Amino acid sequence: MLEAMGSQIAFQGENGMGSSMKLVINLMLAQTMAVFSEAIALGEAMGLDQEKVVNTLLNGATTAPFLKGKKDKILNREFSAEFPLEHMQKDLHLVSQAAYENGVAMPIANLTKEIYAQAKQNGLADADFSAISQFISART
Protein backbone atom coordinates (compact mmCIF):
# COMPACT_ATOMS: atom_id res chain seq x y z
CA MET A 1 0.00 0.00 0.00
CA LEU A 2 2.79 2.41 0.82
CA GLU A 3 4.36 1.92 -2.61
CA ALA A 4 1.04 2.85 -4.25
CA MET A 5 0.85 6.08 -2.22
CA GLY A 6 4.33 7.41 -2.87
CA SER A 7 7.65 6.87 -4.56
CA GLN A 8 9.82 6.95 -1.45
CA ILE A 9 9.44 4.91 1.72
CA ALA A 10 11.70 5.98 4.57
CA PHE A 11 11.32 3.94 7.74
CA GLN A 12 11.51 6.34 10.69
CA GLY A 13 11.59 3.91 13.62
CA GLU A 14 9.12 2.83 16.23
CA ASN A 15 5.39 3.51 16.25
CA GLY A 16 4.62 7.23 15.95
CA MET A 17 7.89 8.27 14.33
CA GLY A 18 6.25 8.45 10.90
CA SER A 19 3.78 11.01 12.24
CA SER A 20 6.65 12.99 13.71
CA MET A 21 8.40 13.01 10.34
CA LYS A 22 5.18 14.16 8.67
CA LEU A 23 5.18 17.21 10.96
CA VAL A 24 8.80 17.96 10.07
CA ILE A 25 8.00 17.73 6.34
CA ASN A 26 4.86 19.86 6.62
CA LEU A 27 6.80 22.47 8.58
CA MET A 28 9.20 22.78 5.64
CA LEU A 29 6.34 22.88 3.12
CA ALA A 30 4.45 25.59 5.03
CA GLN A 31 7.48 27.78 5.60
CA THR A 32 8.73 27.38 2.04
CA MET A 33 5.35 28.35 0.60
CA ALA A 34 5.13 31.41 2.88
CA VAL A 35 8.66 32.59 1.98
CA PHE A 36 8.02 32.02 -1.74
CA SER A 37 4.80 34.03 -1.42
CA GLU A 38 6.57 36.90 0.33
CA ALA A 39 9.21 37.00 -2.39
CA ILE A 40 6.51 37.22 -5.07
CA ALA A 41 4.68 39.96 -3.14
CA LEU A 42 7.90 41.98 -2.81
CA GLY A 43 8.62 41.62 -6.51
CA GLU A 44 5.12 42.79 -7.41
CA ALA A 45 5.34 45.71 -4.98
CA MET A 46 8.55 46.81 -6.70
CA GLY A 47 6.80 46.75 -10.09
CA LEU A 48 7.98 43.38 -11.37
CA ASP A 49 5.63 41.20 -13.39
CA GLN A 50 4.22 38.41 -11.20
CA GLU A 51 4.62 35.67 -13.81
CA LYS A 52 8.22 36.68 -14.51
CA VAL A 53 9.02 36.70 -10.79
CA VAL A 54 7.45 33.26 -10.32
CA ASN A 55 9.23 31.76 -13.34
CA THR A 56 12.58 33.28 -12.39
CA LEU A 57 12.31 31.97 -8.83
CA LEU A 58 11.14 28.54 -9.95
CA ASN A 59 14.14 28.18 -12.23
CA GLY A 60 16.63 29.34 -9.61
CA ALA A 61 18.69 27.38 -7.13
CA THR A 62 16.76 28.59 -4.07
CA THR A 63 13.33 27.18 -4.90
CA ALA A 64 12.02 23.84 -3.64
CA PRO A 65 10.82 21.52 -6.43
CA PHE A 66 7.28 21.14 -5.01
CA LEU A 67 6.62 24.83 -5.75
CA LYS A 68 6.56 24.13 -9.49
CA GLY A 69 3.42 22.10 -8.84
CA LYS A 70 1.79 25.16 -7.24
CA LYS A 71 2.74 27.61 -10.02
CA ASP A 72 -0.63 27.55 -11.84
CA LYS A 73 -2.57 27.90 -8.59
CA ILE A 74 -0.60 31.02 -7.68
CA LEU A 75 -0.62 32.66 -11.11
CA ASN A 76 -4.30 31.90 -11.76
CA ARG A 77 -5.35 32.54 -8.15
CA GLU A 78 -7.26 29.26 -8.29
CA PHE A 79 -6.75 27.51 -4.98
CA SER A 80 -8.84 24.34 -5.14
CA ALA A 81 -7.59 22.28 -2.24
CA GLU A 82 -5.03 19.56 -2.68
CA PHE A 83 -3.97 20.05 0.94
CA PRO A 84 -6.28 22.52 2.71
CA LEU A 85 -4.75 25.53 4.41
CA GLU A 86 -6.58 24.72 7.64
CA HIS A 87 -4.85 21.32 7.76
CA MET A 88 -1.47 22.95 7.28
CA GLN A 89 -2.23 25.41 10.09
CA LYS A 90 -3.27 22.47 12.29
CA ASP A 91 0.02 20.72 11.57
CA LEU A 92 1.92 23.90 12.39
CA HIS A 93 0.10 24.00 15.72
CA LEU A 94 1.19 20.39 16.34
CA VAL A 95 4.76 21.40 15.44
CA SER A 96 4.57 24.17 18.02
CA GLN A 97 3.30 21.74 20.66
CA ALA A 98 5.98 19.17 19.84
CA ALA A 99 8.67 21.86 20.02
CA TYR A 100 7.41 22.95 23.43
CA GLU A 101 7.25 19.38 24.71
CA ASN A 102 10.80 18.71 23.52
CA GLY A 103 12.32 21.99 24.72
CA VAL A 104 13.07 23.34 21.23
CA ALA A 105 12.60 27.04 20.47
CA MET A 106 10.95 27.47 17.06
CA PRO A 107 10.30 31.18 16.52
CA ILE A 108 10.00 30.95 12.74
CA ALA A 109 7.62 27.98 12.96
CA ASN A 110 5.43 29.84 15.44
CA LEU A 111 5.33 32.96 13.28
CA THR A 112 4.44 30.84 10.26
CA LYS A 113 1.66 29.15 12.26
CA GLU A 114 0.17 32.55 13.08
CA ILE A 115 0.34 33.71 9.45
CA TYR A 116 -1.58 30.59 8.39
CA ALA A 117 -4.04 31.16 11.26
CA GLN A 118 -4.70 34.70 10.04
CA ALA A 119 -5.24 33.42 6.50
CA LYS A 120 -7.66 30.84 7.88
CA GLN A 121 -9.54 33.56 9.80
CA ASN A 122 -9.74 35.53 6.55
CA GLY A 123 -11.73 32.83 4.78
CA LEU A 124 -8.98 30.68 3.26
CA ALA A 125 -9.42 27.61 5.51
CA ASP A 126 -10.78 25.36 2.76
CA ALA A 127 -8.42 26.62 0.04
CA ASP A 128 -5.18 24.90 -0.85
CA PHE A 129 -2.33 25.91 1.44
CA SER A 130 -0.77 27.71 -1.53
CA ALA A 131 -3.52 30.32 -0.99
CA ILE A 132 -1.17 31.75 1.61
CA SER A 133 0.25 33.61 -1.40
CA GLN A 134 -3.09 35.38 -1.90
CA PHE A 135 -3.24 36.28 1.79
CA ILE A 136 0.33 37.61 1.84
CA SER A 137 -0.05 39.60 -1.40
CA ALA A 138 -3.26 41.20 -0.10
CA ARG A 139 -1.38 42.43 2.98
CA THR A 140 1.45 44.17 1.13
Image (cartoon, helix red, strand yellow):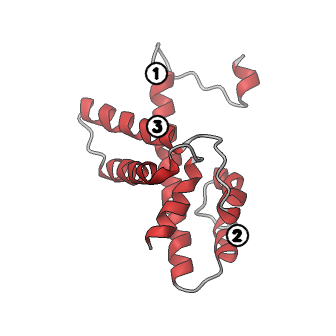
Give the SS element for disc 3: helix
Residue occupying the point 73% across, 31% down: 7
Residue occupying the point 71% across, 29% down: 6
Considering every residue shown, the one lying at the far bottom of the view is: 47
Q: In terms of sequence position, does the residue under pointer 3 or pointer 2 come before the other?
A: 3
**Circle 3: is it few (<14), some (14-19), or many (20+) Cα within 10 Å?**
some
Give the SS element for disc 2: helix
Residue 55 image label: 2
Foreground residue among 123 and 79: 123
Q: Position of residue 103 (x, y in %)?
A: 23, 35
Q: Position of residue 107 (x, y in %)?
A: 29, 51
User: Label 1, on which residue?
Assistant: 17
Cα separation between marks 1 and 3: 11 Å
Cα separation between marks 3 and 2: 27 Å
Can you say which quadrant of the picture contains the N terminus? top right
Residue type, numbered disc 2: Asn
Quadrant housing residue 53: bottom right
Q: Position of residue 109 (x, y in %)?
A: 36, 48
Cα separation between marks 2 and 1: 36 Å
Q: Where is residue 105 in the image (x, y as percent from the top left)?
A: 26, 44
**Circle 1: is it few (<14), some (14-19), or many (20+) Cα within 10 Å?**
few
User: Label 3, on which residue?
Assistant: 24
Residue type, numbered disc 3: Val
Residue occupying the point 32% across, 31% down: 98
**Circle 2: is it few (<14), some (14-19), or many (20+) Cα within 10 Å?**
few
Considering every residue shown, the one lying at the far front of the view is: 123
> Viewer-nearest of labels 2 and 1?
2
Tell whether label 1 touches label 2 (CB within 8 Å): no
Q: In terms of sequence position, does the residue under pointer 2 or pointer 1 come before the other?
A: 1
Residue type, numbered disc 1: Met
Residue occupying the point 39% across, 48% down: 117
Q: In terms of sequence position, does the residue under pointer 1 or pointer 3 come before the other?
A: 1
